[in-house]
Image: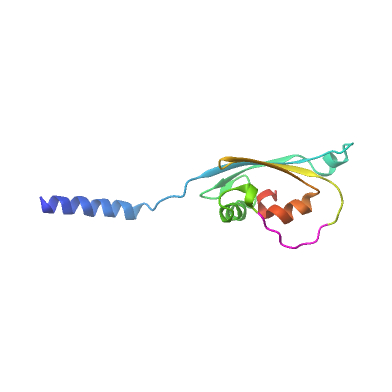
Amino acid sequence: MRTALGLVAAAALALSLASPAQAEATSYDLSLSPVSPGGVEAAETTPFRSVVLECGPAGGTHPAAQAACDLIGEAGGRVSEVETGTGGICTMIHRPVTVVADGGGERYEETFGNECLLREAKGAVFDF
């Protein structure tokens, strides 16, 4: 009986070591759209864009998926809490953009004065 229990325990240990625990996969639908305050100029210079970001492991259609997932992970899994604030310099050209993130248990939406201010605030998350 002791031998059978020992074999079962050894088999269970071997299985647990053979397949490491996977982080839970999270998917985000991200979009960036121009805000046209009284004209179509913004839409002409900033087209609507959207990507899918997969985290755990990083992937999807986002061009910098790993960097974006790292930022979201550092922010506790919430896009709304991502704050890069690199101290870069942005022009004050008013070309507002609205970003939306759906996924990870949240819906986040915010408007920024221009794409540079967006990149300063959210880094790679909306850099697509």
State which quadrant residue 52 falls in: top right
At a point 24% along the width and 51% down the height, the residue shown is 11
Colouring scheme, one of rainbow, by chain, secondary structure, one colour: rainbow
The reply, left or right, for residue 106 in relation to residue 93 is left
The reply, left or right, for residue 74 in relation to residue 1 is right
The reply, left or right, for residue 38 in relation to residue 32 is right
At a point 84% along the width and 44% down the height, the residue shown is 45
Residue 101's x, y, as percent? 65, 42
Residue 119's x, y, as percent? 73, 54
Residue 23 drawn in magenta = no
At a point 53% along the width and 44% down the height, the residue shown is 26
Outermost residue on the left side: it is 1
Q: Is residue 20 above or below residue 103?
A: below
Residue 110's x, y, as percent? 72, 43
Q: Is residue 127 above or below residue 42?
A: below
State which quadrant residue 86 falls in: bottom right
At a point 78% along the width and 50% down the height, the residue shown is 115
Q: Is residue 112 above or below residue 67?
A: above
Secondary structure character of the magenta stretch overall: loop
Residue 69's x, y, as percent? 58, 52
Q: How many marks?
A: 0
Residue bounds of the magenta highlight: 83-90
Residue 85 drawn in magenta = yes
